[in-house]
Amino acid sequence: MAENYAARNTQGLHRIAEDDPLAIALLKEEHHRFRELFTEANDAEGERLKHVADELCLRLDVHMTIEEELLYPTGKEVGETEEVDEGIVEHAAGKQLAAEIAQLNGTEELYKSKVHVLGEQTIHHIDEEDEELFEEMREAHVAGKIDLDALGEKLRARQAELYQKIEESGDLGPTNEADAEEIAHV
């Protein structure tokens, strides 16, 4: 059996604490769902794997968009530029692989391997956010430098708006997320 990423949801800084500000709690809830889905994908085959992978690609798209539009600029405000920049680069790699997976029908020879690698990359990324970026931003919140509860409301509203766009049109439409094309030119 493949690694059980979901087990991490109850460990250390991955847990949702009672005193987590809304933004952190919301994003950790999403991280929990990703760990559960990637655990399921590791054990899935055929149509079930395709269904799980499609859900992952959709959720990742929305999740990365709200982080890039709202969380990351706030992180930079409090001096987390290096963490945020790494996150943007990791998102770009994830977006590329997720877009490729979304175009496949699930029967390709390397399909399961592509989903597995996306999982490894994503789990690494969300573990770092839980353990590093969120903790630094929590400290800034406690010090009164940022309001992660108000940011959480914005994240939730933007997330709902993006899912509504998907429901109506089948895609996110234009977003204000970080431009992955910029990364290749830096």
Image (cartoon, rainbow, N blue to C red):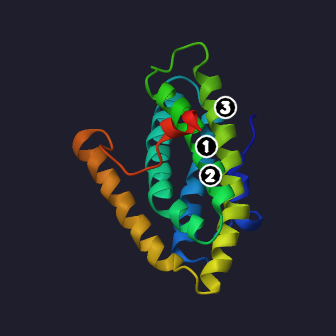
Residue depicted at x 45% and y 28%: 102
The disc placed on residue 85 is 2
**Could you say which is closer to the camera, residue 46 or residue 96?**
96
Residue 81: give x, y in percent of width and height: 64, 60
As measured in the structure, the alpha-carbon distance from the residue carrying label 2 to the one carrying label 3 is 21 Å
Report the amino acid beneath label 3: Val
Contact (Cβ within 8 Å) of mark 1 with mark 3: no
- Residue on which disc 3 sits: 117
**Could you say which is closer to the camera, residue 140 or residue 10?**
140
Residue 3: give x, y in percent of width and height: 75, 40
Of labels 2 and 3, earlier in sequence is 2
Contact (Cβ within 8 Å) of mark 2 with mark 1: yes
Q: What secondary structure is found at the residue carrying circle 1?
A: helix
Q: Residue 7 lies in what quarter of the image? A: bottom right
Which image quarter holds the C terminus? top right
Contact (Cβ within 8 Å) of mark 2 with mark 3: no
- Is residue 50 visible to us here? yes
Residue 119: give x, y in percent of width and height: 64, 38
Query: Is 61 drawn above or below residue 22 in the view shown?
Result: above
As measured in the structure, the alpha-carbon distance from the residue carrying label 1 to the one carrying label 3 is 16 Å
**Could you say which is closer to the camera, residue 77 or residue 32?**
77
Query: Is 183 drawn above or below residue 115 in the view shown?
Result: below
Residue depicted at x 46% and y 46%: 59
Report the amino acid beneath label 2: Asp
As measured in the structure, the alpha-carbon distance from the residue carrying label 2 to the one carrying label 1 is 6 Å
Which image quarter holds the N terminus? top right
